[in-house]
Amino acid sequence: MNTFLAGALLADEAVLIARHLAECPTCPALVELQHSVGAWRPNIPVACAALGPGDAVGRYVLLHRVGAGGMGVVWAAYDPELDRRLAIKLLGDAAQAVPDLRERFEREARITARLQHPSIVHVQEAGQYAPGEPYYVMKLVTGDSLEHVIAQRPRLADRLALVPNVSAIIEAIAYAHSQGVIHRDLKPQNVIVGAFGETVVIDWGLATSSSEATDGMVMGTPSYMPPEQAEGDAVDERADVYALGAILYHVLAGVRPYAGRDAPATFAAVIGEPPAPLATLAPTAPAELVTIVNKAMARSAGDRYPSAKQLADELAKFMTGQLVGSHRYSRRELAWRWVRRHRTAITAGSVLVLGGLAVFGLMRETTVRDTRCEGMEQQLVGVWDAERAAAVRAAFVAGGQPYAVDSFGRITKRLEEYSRGWVATRVAACEATHLRGVQSSALLDLRMRCLDRRLSELDQHVRALASTPRGETLEHAIRATTELVSLERCNDSEALLAVVPPPRDPAAQFAVTVLERRLDKASALQRLGRYRDSIAELEGLAREAARLAYPPIEAQVHYHEAQTRRLAGQFAQAEAAARLAVDAAARAKDDELLADAWIELVGAISYLDQRETVTTLEPFARAAVSRAGDVPFQRSRFLNVFANSSFKQLDLKRARELYEQSLALGDRKDPRHRATLVNLAMLTFREGKYADAKQSFEELLVLEERDLGSEHPDTARVLYHLCLSTHSLGELAAAQQHCERAVAVRERSLGPDDPRTADALELLGTVLGRRADSRAEDYLRRAVQIKENKLGPEHAEVGRMIGNLAQLLQQQGELVEAIALSRRALEIALKARGPDHPLIAYPRLALGTALADAGDHVHGRVHLEASLALFTKALGADHPNIAHALIGLARCDLALGNLGLALDEAQRSFAIRERAEQDPAALAEASFVLAQTLWETKRDRPRALSLARSAADRYAGAGAGAAKERAAIADWLRTRTGS
């Protein structure tokens, strides 16, 4: 029973007990008895119980107890070093009653240490004051619990003054959600209201990561718990949304939503029925607040606000006098809202005899003003309507791509959503001035100008979709539609007012408008991958914008030029344009665009391999993003561009940290984060974690097929990487299947001569080579030819592909051509990247092994040693790629008589491959090299024979592709054992 009341039973057990207690005539009395005598508790740990005022915890001196809960005790304390008061939380006696409370205590410390928000108390330090007795230190917040404050205010009018405090709670939880944290135990007891109105959310002991499973255990306070949590089902951020609504319910009603006679009865009520209607408990409560509570506390999670951020926005609208989106206003409500805002004017003209006329005139005025905000959807005619949709569909179908119709359906859905959002935003902006009187005409003009710009962008986007020749950029269409500029910018009053205003001269205003429309066209072309057309448009715009000397349009033109040139591979020109964009955005006082321009500048420079310059610019870019408000998606882009730079330099640890931070700022399943997810999976592969990489790409395949369809080129990209991962694990049949599908999708969607089709052909050829399939060489030669035709014979990608062809020829014993091609691959790589670039390790490795196979062990060793040095510097001493170079060196040194070196190299390579999650054939290779070395050095010949036999066994599962290796081992064993 104590375990049940502590909230620590498994879900099924807790629900069964709650339901039984709701029906049983006897057991509730036992529960009442349990409450009356108090639940059994174990002895308090001596280290905790013995503490009192004046005792030391670390360097802190305890002053007095502030409070205690089910998990810990909070003391006010003094810090003599910094002369300050603070709070210390110690793990209390309850940790002995419920085994996982210690873990919860430590988790609370970790979570609150990383949450930086004014309404969340930040953990400053953690430690142990005695063996096994943890504590952590935080700011001392004085005040009363929100529950106590509510109880002291019997009148609704007094409790309504607490709505700003509830708003602060919701904002804090919205921030926590953005950091991937769910509280799971929100209630007025866990909110402190300070003497000056400050509001703090405490007790994060049940908090969890939004990515973790949270079902199976009923935890939390039932009075504020959503039904799915009470049932023990999985919960997400919407469970916190429900609890926030329940707190607001408590504020309005003055009582808890559920207040059973005991915990079991409360659980049963939460599961079985909604709370008492607010209309009954608080009939005079504002209708909008009642609507907000009802939506937040919807029985089904899908009917609630999707996030605490949306709940916060709705409450903010109520508090600022705006219309609440979830509330349906009657004409009577709208009229009275107008009356309340204009009561002074009405009173000034109040002659009783004319009262009726005044009210009639008022209602007529309301109607006139309301009409001004109607019919906004008519502005979409000719922009996005049935006729334009038909034109887009015809353009898609004309290209003949197999995924055209599916893509059109997905794009149509998104354009409909954007169009509806545009109408709603325009109506809200209009009503803020003409209906509610809460917005100046000047701000209305700025918002309407912003929305006019969004409509222009939508128009140009649809025009580009409908005019794309032969549907050639269809592959970009879905993602391009998700990249339309957010309508939220037009609601950011502060940002709109900060930007340099348009010119006053009518002619200059007209010129700016014309340039904006042309820029919207160039931007649409860029999003759809038509970079050459977009650059041609932007070059002319840049000259005209310079003559106009209006910084906002200059900044936008240069920013889009930088972005487009980077996407087109013109990195030096992209850098130059980005620098101009930074300068112009600063003059335009557009903080958001300035941050974007800094991100674009760093991105362009990172492609030029100027790592030192990237490092120098990082603090400037970081400051710009912070000044722009630390918008989550913008900060995510900022982190992603630096992660990409680290990845290019093979600084894999730093790249992983940055990618993870980037993804933590938003929903990992958001299509806008898809490129980061792909990069992180590729990074996992480069780290040699092939099984983890395979799992990541399998998850990505599900997302891409859901969002883009199975025939989309981006789906083929994931299939390509799945092939690469399974190939590295030795799962050759699966690898061939993934590769063949990637080739087929790319040939159908991109064409047989696209460079990405060549990439898939190259990888398929490599896999087939491992399986001794005669088609392998043809696929690789065809891939090289496609790349040379598209990129030129000296391109780094051509060199990389030639190197892979050389390795296949080496496997087939065609060493003369293999060496010649390996030399050419190395020459191209050195010319493109320089001698010290980490990627030079691969062509040096290929040439070194080819020379060694041809008997030139001296020169082969030179290249292998250089490869090992580059790999070690970039990847560390234990990366799987290190083993490739070590095996080659061991073979060379064995042939050259350097037996001591050979043994060390063979042992290191074997140890690396034994630890790695790799193809069994890779460990077989290392085993046989070590066997040969042990035999020749006469160190451990029995082990040498054992290793050789195990290598033969591992090669047995590799199929026909390992026939030569199996034969070599058999010959070696026969000459040494006679069998």
Image (cartoon, grey):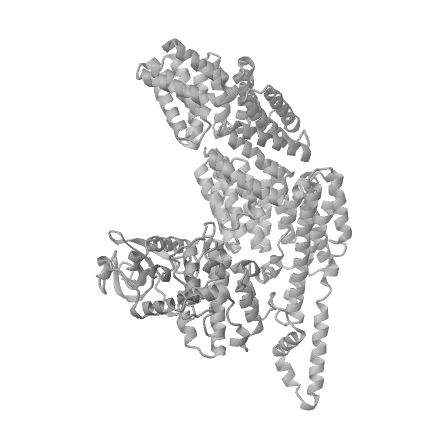
Report the label total: 0
Percent across and percent down for residue 876 are 40, 32
Q: Is residue 232 visible?
A: yes
Q: Residue at x 66, y 62 (%)?
A: 424
In the image as oriented, which residue stretches furthest toward the bottom? 353
Point out residue 272 in the picture as x, y percentages from the top left corner. Answer: 50, 65
Residue in view at x 41 percent, y 61 percent: 17
Q: Left or right: where does residue 566 sit relative to residue 174?
A: right
Direction from residue 440 to residue 157 in the image, left or right: left
Residue 373: give x, y in percent of width and height. Answer: 70, 67
Task: Say if residue 755 shows up in the picture.
Answer: no
Looking at the image, the residue that sits furthest to the right is: 387
Out of 885 and 158, give the one closest to the viewer: 158
Which one is nearer the viewer's eye here, 61 or 826?
Answer: 61
Q: Where is 836 relative to 215, above or below?
A: above
The quadrant the N terminus occupies is bottom left
Tell me: residue 531, above or below residue 184.
Answer: above
Residue extending farthest to the front is: 25
Q: Position of residue 363 (x, y in %)?
A: 70, 78
